[in-house]
């Protein structure tokens, strides 16, 4: 059984043509099959034909009710188009159905591949976040030790400056020796202070970025670690109720755990 096909659709040697718009058209992406009466080209064509038919109506016919005129015009247009479309009317044959099936399969196949790619990328992202966080936790401890040593060196330079000032006030060194020692120590102090400030800022940026990705991963993936954290939170609540830990310790640990989970 054939389906409703727009009477303005014509198959040519080079493809399909819309006779209303006088241009090539892809009927599988337009209204040509089934719902052609909703097509804006068809609607506009009908309106244009209606105006022409009305202009050609004799004066004696204009007294007819508008509804009756519209019905007559529609019948006239339908009759005319049925006659002119005898040689151009396109039936939805087996070839057309095969084309629709091929087009549908093509769209699904294309997005099946995209969906698989997204899934693979998400797995890679999960593995990357886990691996980066684990490595960061190990290296972070070593980094903090280095930075603590640098902070102690900075504090030592600060004490050395105070000592130089004291030596000068006690007359143990002259002005030339004082100026040389002070300038030398001040340069070292300024250098290590600036570098510590930079290292701390970069450390905080890395820590914040990794934690953001890790929290995102926990929110979207059910992992054993999430279950373990929730269990730890429940045990913490129980220890606080039993008076085994202080309120201060309870609130601090609770905030840390919830900060990771939420």
Image: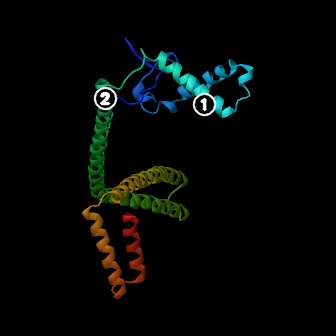
Q: Residue 245: where, in percent of width, then height?
A: 35, 83
Residue at 68% across / 32% down in the picture? 66
Q: Nearer the viewer, residue 102 or 169?
A: 102
Q: In this view, does 47 lie to the left or right of 4?
A: right
Q: Residue 46: where, in percent of width, then height?
A: 58, 25
Numbered label attached to residue 97: 2
Please tell me whether mark 2 or mark 1 is closer to you in this view.
Answer: 1
N-terminal of the pair, mark 2 or mark 1, is 1
Q: Which of 241 and 243 is in front in this view?
A: 241
Q: Residue 33: where, in percent of width, then height?
A: 42, 29
Figure check: 19 above or below 199: above
Mark 2 to mark 1: distance in Å?
34 Å
Residue 237 at least partly seen: yes
Query: Outermost residue, bottom direction?
Result: 242
Q: How crowded is mark 2: few (under 14 residues within 10 Å), some or many (20 or more)?
A: few
Badge 2 element = helix
Numbered label attached to residue 71: 1
Figure check: 193 above or below 159: above
Figure check: 44 above or below 255: above
Q: In this view, does 103 lie to the left or right of 4?
A: left
* Quarter residue 109 falls in: top left
Q: In which quarter of the image is the N terminus?
A: top left
Residue 20 at least partly seen: no
Residue at 32% across / 37% down in the picture? 111
Residue at 37% across / 53% down in the picture? 213
* Quarter residue 208 falls in: bottom left
């Amino acid at each position: 059984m054939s389906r409703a096909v727009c009477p303005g659709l014509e198959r040519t040697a080079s493809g399909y043509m819309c006779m209303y718009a006088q241009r090539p058209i892809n009927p599988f992406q337009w209204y040509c099959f089934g719902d052609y009466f909703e097509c804006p080209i068809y609607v506009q064509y009908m309106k244009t034909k209606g105006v022409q038919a009305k202009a050609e109506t004799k004066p004696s016919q204009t007294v007819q009710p508008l509804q009756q005129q519209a019905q007559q015009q529609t019948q006239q247009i339908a009759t005319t188009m049925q006659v002119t479309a005898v040689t151009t009317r396109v039936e939805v044959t087996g070839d057309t159905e095969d084309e629709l099936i091929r087009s549908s399969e093509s769209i699904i196949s294309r997005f099946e591949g995209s969906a698989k790619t997204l899934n693979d990328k998400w797995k890679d992202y999960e593995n990357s976040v886990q691996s980066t966080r684990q490595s960061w936790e190990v290296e972070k401890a070593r980094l903090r030790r280095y930075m603590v040593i640098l902070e102690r060196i900075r504090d030592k330079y600060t004490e050395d400056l105070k000592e130089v000032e004291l030596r000068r006030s006690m007359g143990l060194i002259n002005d030339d020796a004082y100026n040389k020692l002070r300038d030398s120590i001040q340069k070292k102090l300024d250098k290590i202070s600036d570098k510590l400030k930079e290292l701390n800022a970069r450390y905080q940026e890395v820590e914040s970025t990794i934690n953001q990705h890790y929290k995102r991963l926990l929110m979207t993936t059910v992992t054993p670690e999430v279950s373990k954290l929730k269990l730890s939170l429940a045990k913490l609540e129980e220890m606080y109720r039993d008076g085994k830990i202080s309120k201060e310790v309870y609130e601090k640990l609770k905030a840390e755990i919830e900060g990771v989970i939420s």
